[in-house]
Amino acid sequence: MEIIGNVEKDAQVRAVASGALPSGDTVIVNADGTVSVVEGSNISSSLGSATAFETTIKGFFGSSYDSNSNKVVFAYKDEGNSDYGTAVVGTISGTSISFGTPVVYASVNSDFHTCAFDSSNNKVVVGYNDNVNDLGKAIVGTVSGTSISFGSAVSFPASNVCNYISSVFDSNSNKVVFAYRDAGASQRGKAAVATVSGTSLSFGSAGTFLNTTGNGPENMCMAFDSVNNKVVLAFQDRNDSNKAKGIVGTVSGTNISFGSISEIPSSSADIAEDGMGGIAYDVNSEKIVVVYRASSVSNYGRVSVGTVSGTSISFAAAATFASFTTGTGAQTPKIVYNPTAKKVVVVVEGTSQNNLYEGVVSGDTVTFSSPLAYAASSPRALSNPVYASTPDKVVIGYQADNNNGTSAVYQTAYTSTNLTSENFLGFAAHTYADTQSALVNSTCTVDRNQTGLTAGQTYYVQTDGSLGTTAGDPSVVAGTAISSTEIIVKG
C-alpha cells in the first residue's frame, strides 16, 4: 500500500484491488493490505426441523456449546432409564442437527441439570443434584466426535440437597461458577467456584448470595459480563413475595464474593416450581438482559435491562414483550445473545405453542420482533438456548408433547457486512478490475464521483456500501459533502 500526498493533511492511497472497484464506491482496507468495496447482504431468519435426541426426558436440563469441537451438548434426566443423568452431543449442519448416542454420566436418580463450557480447558462441565445421596455434584466431560466421556463426579461444598442449580463460565478467571439453593444451610442461596484440571475438578469455599433462611431463592440463572469481568446472577426470592432480583459476583482465585442485591422494578415473578427465566449479556450494548414470567402481570413474559457498575447492578423497569399467558406451571422464557446479529433471542412457552423472539437492546429498552412459533405444544420444559459460533446459529432444546427431548436450529436475521468501525479507507478514484493497482481518495481528499449529495451534510457509510445521513451499525463517518457530486473524505 502506497500513500500519495501529505500524510498529515491529505492522502490518496494506492493498493491492490481485491475484487472490482467501481469509481466512487466506498472502500475498505483488508487485513492483507488489499482494498475492497464495502458490501453487505441481508440474512433472513429461518428455523430448521425439530429433531429428537431422547425419547423421555423430565425436568430442568442443561445445554452448552463446545467451541473446540463445534458441538452442542445437552445434559438431562432420562426418565426412560431410571432418571439417570445423561448427555448427548449434537452436530449442526445448516439449520439441521443430528445427535450421537446418549451417554450416562450419573447412574442415579438426578435432577436440576446444568452445563457450561470451559473454553480454557476445552471441557463441558455438568452440574446436577444426586437425588439418591442428596448432594449437588459436578462432573467434567470431554467431547470427541459425536460422543462425550466423563471423569468422576465431585460434590458441591454443601452438606445436603442442592436445588435450582445454574452455571456459567467466567472467562476472566477461567473458572466455572455454580449457583444453587443449599438445603443443608437452611435453603440459603450459595455459589461455588470450580477449577477444572484434566478430567477432574475441585471446588473452593461456597459464597452466600442470599442469606435469608426458609424458602430461599429459586430458579437461578447466570451470565458473565465480559467487559466488567463479573458474574451476574438473577433469581426469584421466595422469602420476599417471589420478587425477581439480581446480584453481581466477583471471582477471586477459587472463591466468589457478592455485592448487594437489586430488585427488578415492578416485578413479582411468582413462578412456583419452574424457571425464573433467563439471563444474557449483550456485549454490543454492554447490558445484562433478564427475562421471566410475571404472575403480577397476567403471567406475561417480561424483560428488564441491567447495568453493572463495580459490584452492583441496577435494573430498568420491567416491560412486557409477550402479552399472552405463558401458562400456569410452565417454565418461563429463556434467552441467549447472538453476537453476529447483535440481538438477543428469547424462547417462550405458550399455552398452545412455543414462540421465539428476536430483540435489539438500545439503552435500557429491548425492541422485539413479532413471535415465531417453533413448536406447537402444551407448555414444556426448556433448556437455555445456546449460540453456536462457527455455524452462527442458535440451538433450542425443549421437551415436546410426547416427552421427547427435542432440538431445533434457528438462523437469526441480520445484515452481513465487511465494514467495521475501523476499516473504512475512502472512495475509489476510478474504476479498477480485480488485482489492479487502485487509487483511493482517502483522508481529507475530495472525491468527485458522487451523485445526489447535499452540500454541508455529513454522510455515513452504510453496511451495504451506500451513503446515508444517519449512522449505520457500525457508525462510520464517510465525510462532508461540498456539492451534489463532491465529498471531503473524513479526517
Image (cartoon, rainbow, N blue to C red):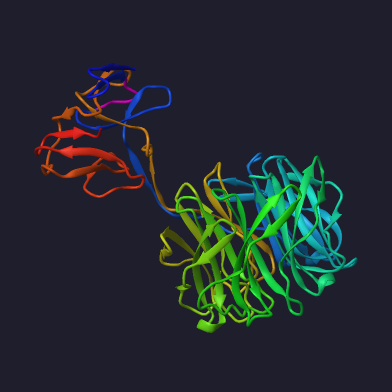
Residue that appears at 70% across and 40% down? 122
Quadrant where the C terminus sits is: top left
Looking at the image, which is closer to me, 391 or 477?
477
- Depicted 41 relative to depicted 300: above or below: above
In the shown orientation, is residue 130 left or right of residue 467? right
Picture layout, residue 474 above or below residue 427: below
Residue 204 picture location, percent across and down: 80, 52
**Residue 481 point in image, percent of width and height:** 15, 39
Give above or below for 366 relative to 350.
above
Q: Along the line of sight, which residue is nearer the eye, 386 or 467?
A: 467
In the rendering, at what x and y percent does residue 277 appear? 59, 68
Task: Please tell me whether residue 17 belongs to the stretch shown in magenta.
Answer: yes
Image height check: is 450 above or below 234?
Answer: above
Q: Quadrant of residue 462?
A: top left
In the drawing, does residue 363 fall left or right of residue 156?
left
Residue at figure coordinates x 54%, y 68% from the top left: 291
- Closer to the camera, 451 or 192? 192
Q: Which residues are magenta?
A: 16-21
Does the rendering let one see residue 347?
A: no
- Name the magenta segment's main secondary structure: loop
Looking at the image, which is closer to me, 452 or 107? Answer: 452
Give the quarter of the image for residue 245.
bottom right
Image point 80% across, 56% down: which residue?
205
Instruction: Using residue 476 as the reference point, say whether residue 64 is left or right of it.
Output: right
Q: Does residue 222 show up magenta in the picture?
A: no
Q: Does residue 115 appear in this view?
A: yes
